[in-house]
Image (cartoon, rainbow, N blue to C red):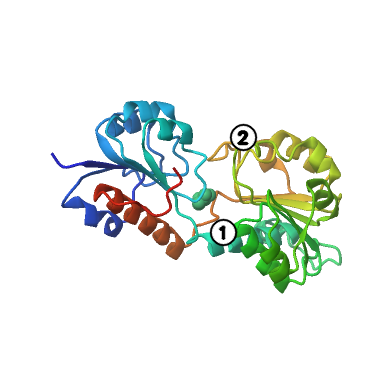
Amino acid sequence: MKPKIFITRKLPEEMVAPFREKYDVRMWDAEDAAVKRYVLLEEVKEAEVLWSVVSDAIDREVFETAKKLKIVANMAVGYNNVDIEAAKEHGVIVTNTPDVLTETTADLAFALLLATARRLYHAEEELRSGGWTSWSPMGYTGMDVGGATIGIIGMGRIGEAVARRATGFNMRILYHNRNRKPAAEEAYGAEYADMDTLLKEADFVVVLAPHTPETVGLIGERELALMKKTASIINVARGGIIDEQALYKALKNDVIWAAGLDVFETEPVPLNNPLLTLPNVTALPHIGSASIRTRIGMMELNAKAIHAVLEGREPENRVV
Ligand code: DGY
């Protein structure tokens, strides 16, 4: 019997084809829907490889069901969707896809920052719906990005790439991170700040921290209240790092000026999420890494790791 690979989302055939001869490749191939939970649990029973995406909950039950599993190759740099402790206990390797998505995600962070600052989606919506009736001196006005202060929470690879972009906009760069980053301080003039100082001084707070038990609810009512009334918050990391209820209240009551969100506590974001009713929210469907080249690069890293494990070699980008 050929070893079985289960892939939780439809991937381009050229990524999958190299596995077909030697392995029994099974793929959830619905174009636009996440794998059903019961299908995942059925398919992993015999699988040696689970090729997953960020929206799959690869939890303890999966590891308990998947008796033959050797590797979870997760198509994301973040791996909060995988129960790492359970993976360790079951002796399953987990790999992720760092580096290839750094620049693409930083581009999106900056695009969202600009779109939020200049209210681009609101302005475009007005134009398309016939709301643009005349040029108005204060119509559609937003906030300046050039020369403003950016506060980056989480100065990892993507944080540094955002800082690099910020230098081009002549911004003052504050950052907060578990460890200081002398190289980034040197290269981009970034200043280390404690959280409260960063929140008080930044015009644009950009959340790039990983989703861990320590960062869940990191930005709540108290933290939002520290921010300037004219400041915006941008989240391209993970939902849940900002408390959505507190954020809603802060935006509604003009405690802060605006938010740009690529990630949500529940994804896909339910249409009744109150944040979507606010004109000062710019919302995107978790597209940080969504360029063609980057998504292919992420799959290539997954494929390499899977080949390595199936051939008895140590994979790159192993997180456990
Ligand atoms: C990641 O890689 O963690 C992204 O959020 C998925 O695009």
Q: Amino acid at mark 1?
A: Thr
Image vertical order of residue 168 relative to residue 143, above or below? below
Dividing the picture into quadrants, the one containing residue 191 is bottom right
Mark 2 Cα-neighbour bin, 10 Å: few <14, some 14–19, many ≥20: few
Residue that mark 2 sits on: 213
Asked if labels 2 and 1 touch by Cβ distance under 8 angstroms, the answer is: no
Image spot of residue 233 (x, y percent): 73, 50
From the viewer's perspective, is 225 left or right of 319? right
Residue pushed farthest left?
Answer: 1
Q: Is residue 140 visible?
A: no
Q: What's the mark number on residue 105?
A: 1
From the viewer's perspective, is 37 left or right of 154? left
Image spot of residue 243 (x, y percent): 70, 36
* Label 1 secondary element: helix
Q: Residue at x 49, y 38 (%)?
A: 81
* Label 2 secondary element: loop
Q: Nearer the viewer, residue 34 or 160?
A: 160
Question: Is label 1 within 8 A of ligand 1 (CB to nearest ligand atom)?
Answer: yes
